[in-house]
Amino acid sequence: MALHVQQFFHDVLALPFDEHAVVGDAYYATPQPTSALRLRIDFAPTIRHGEYDGLRLRVIHPDQGILDIAILPFAEHGTFTRRDAARDLVAGRDGYAVFRDWHARISEPPWHGADGAGLRTAIEQYARVWFPTPPAPPRPAARPAAQPKPTTGASPRFR
C-alpha cells in the first residue's frame, strides 16, 4: 500500500496545504508556516489487520508530542457511498465503508472509487481550529480629511 498512499492524499483528497510530505503511510503538513505545530494524517485501522475505516488526524508539537487526535470515519463523510451502492453494501454488512489492503498485487489501489470531498472539507475545518489564519496586520487609522477653514472676508492677518 505504501506506493499508493501518496496517490490517495494527492488525488483523492487534494488537500490545500503548501508545505506537506508523504512519508511512509502518513501525510505530514505544516498548515501554518510560522507555527511549531504539525498535522499528521494516516489511515484509521479497524480491529482487522489491513482494514481501514477512516482517517486519523493528529496535531503534533515537537516538544509536547500529540496534542489532539480526531478520527474521520469514511461512512460519515460519504467516501465510499457510490462504490458501496454499486456493490449492494449497506451499513452493518461486512466491507461497508472500509477498504482492505489484503492483496499487494492488485493494480488498483484498495480505495479505488473513493470520493474525498467530504473528508477534505472535514480536514480543512479541523485545520482551521488548530491552525487559524493569522489576522491581517492592522491598517493605519484613516486621518480625517482636513476641513478648509471658513473665510470671513477679513484679511488673513486678523483671523
Image: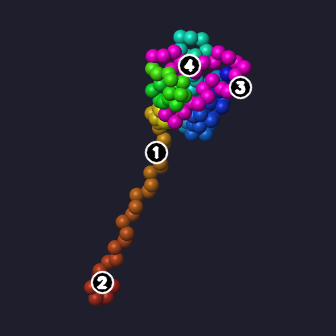
Where is residue 74? Give x, y as percent.
Answer: 50, 25
For disc 2, the marked residue is 151
Most foreground residue, 16 or 65? 16
Please name the residue that numbered disc 3 is placed on: 107
Q: Please give the name of the residue rendered at 48% of the width and 42% of the height, measured from the top-left corner.
A: 134
Label total for image? 4
The residue where tag 1 is placed is 135
Q: Which residues are magenta?
A: 92-119
10 Å neighbourhood of mark 3: few (<14), some, or many (≥20)? Answer: few
* Residue 133 within the segment the image draws in magenta: no
How packed mark 4 is, by other alpha carbons closer than 10 Å (few <14, some 14-19, many 20 or more), is many
Tell me the amino acid under the disc marked 1: Pro
What amino acid type is highlighted by mark number 2?
Answer: Thr
> Secondary structure beneath disc 2?
loop
Numbered disc in front, either 4 or 3: 3
- Quadrant of res 10: top right
Q: How far apart in space, not on screen, are marks 2 and 3 (Cα)?
A: 87 Å
The span from disc 4 to disc 3 (Cα, nearest Å) is 19 Å
Name the residue beneath numbered marker 4.
52
